[in-house]
Image (cartoon, rainbow, N blue to C red):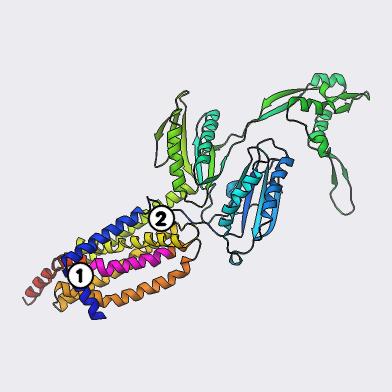
Amino acid sequence: MFAKFEQAVLKGIQSQKQRKYIILGTIAALFLSIMMIPTELVLAKMLPGKNNDTFNIYVKLPQGSSIEQTNSVTNCVASIIQKEKEVTDLEVFLGMGSPLDFAGLIKGSQFKNSENVAELVVNLTKKHEREEPSYMMVQRLRPVILKSCQSIVKESDISFVEPPAGPPTLAAIVAEIYGNDAKGIRELADKVDGIFKKTKGLVDVDTMEDAIYDTFDIKVNPEKAARSGVSIKQINDIMYLAFEGMDIAVKNSPKYNDQIPIFLSLSDSSKRFTTKDLDALRAKLSSLKLMNKFGMMVPITEMVSIVSTKSNPTIMSKDLHQMTNVMAETDMVSQVYPLIDARAQILKELSNDYDITKTGLFDLELKDKKSGKVYELKWDGEMKVTLDTFRDLGGAFIAALVLIFLLMVVYYKSYTLSGIILIGSFLSIIGVIVGHWIMDIFTTDTFFLTATSLIGFIALIGISSRNSLLLIDFTKSLMHDKGMHKADAIAYATATRAKPIFLTATAIILASTLLAGDAVFGGLGVSLIFGTIAAVIASLMVVPILLYNADLEKHFHFHEKKAVSITDPL
């Protein structure tokens, strides 16, 4: 077996035709594997979906919606969730957010405190006891719930929130819109929101801003109140009692040290308006009367005036700059590709109203053609974390290659040999990318090229370099100490070192199979398995050919050693 392999290697490196085919095949394999990323055969993402034992559902109705409307939408969502056999229990928080968890802390669950919001916490059976991952369940339930429940109240938003697999972010894709004009920011945010909703792969689109709606201010006329013999405090109290409720007295109890407040409120039917208009409010106020100091009943409408106005939205800022966020999640796809599509649509659809300038890799500057006001659109969220992570890991990979190259130059005093080692290490990327493509074929959901995949690729550089070093050093020893011809030395060294290379690769592959099945570290395991296979093939096929094409006597500095041996006796 050893002799046959040695003869095959010797024949391969001595045949110009075979050398040409192997080199061209390697270049083609490298090019085609790298092209799998831009052609989207292999998709890149920060981290894949994480199989959790819980997820949350946020319900957000239009500003000014009643608690009864929120309750009707929430009940619809709960009724669908309760039919799932994998759901152990369901908690509903009406008009508030749930107790803070990892995801809610970032997404602002603690700020939910109004009648138009609700949060549902869905608890599932343990992930090892069910076949369907939580993220697949969310993907399946989302269209069903949106179709059944979102139409109950017009313009309702129902979004699904899962605990993050990696660094927590506000959303998968966040468009931060900055400017000095609140109205202009709102208009631009609405347009970006509309583009997000039309972009394939984006779901749970929401703009982090308060809606502007019609409201009414009830202003007390102090002069009329004084003439009627009613104090302003009485008017305020009856208004709170009619619409909110208030503490009117306390009760002492032998069981408690503190006094127990007695809260009085009108019934729900008494507080409810027939319609949301000025006439309905006047009709409600006309039914409220106060007894003045003369014992006469005075209608509230005699002492107050009603002014129709608009609500005051919250002004958001970041780093002392006024802004707002347009957020979207991705539906089992990478963040990169929907963002590219959405950005292309922004450039296309908004170019009629804005002069758009590219200010970064994806960031944009938009100047309103009519007003001349300038706005900035910056991308954040998991998308930015993904870009930063891949940039940093790419930098680490380049740094590792440069350091290995410099170390080899110092050791061999040859740029050619150092380059051969570097090429042998880099070719493991073929296995990393192709391995993700193969795994994507055999898995039900998308198998992404993740940050852990790049970590595995960087770790492979050292292993691949070791294989090439074994071949080069043994070849050098055979040529120098035994005087073997270059081709024979390369073939013998390759055949001899093939066994330890195979054993090392087998150990790495078997150890990495445990990682390959993990949701988060699956990319690391696949990179190590298939990258190691590619590294072994490169070490036993490509590196010998590169060594044969190099002038080894020159790069091994044999002529310097011969000169030293001649002058030694003197």
Residue 42 is marked as 2
Is 234 above or below relative to 501? Answer: above
* Residue 275 rendering spot, x and y as whole percentages: 75, 30
Dominant SS type (magenta): helix
Which residue is found at the position 33% from the left and 65% from the top?
534
Assess whether residue 372 is covered by the magenta stretch. Answer: no
The quadrant of the rendering that contains the N terminus is: bottom left
The residue carrying mark 1 is: 12
Is 220 above or below relative to 179? Answer: above
Left or right of 71? Residue 539 is left
Residue 476 is marked as none
Which is nearer the N-term, disc 2 or disc 1? 1
Assess whether residue 529 is covered by the magenta stretch. Answer: yes
| Closer to the camera in the image, 440 or 423 | 440
Question: Are the residues tagged 2 and 1 within 8 Å (C-beta)?
Answer: no
Number of dots carrying numbers: 2
| Closer to the camera in the image, 490 or 394 | 490
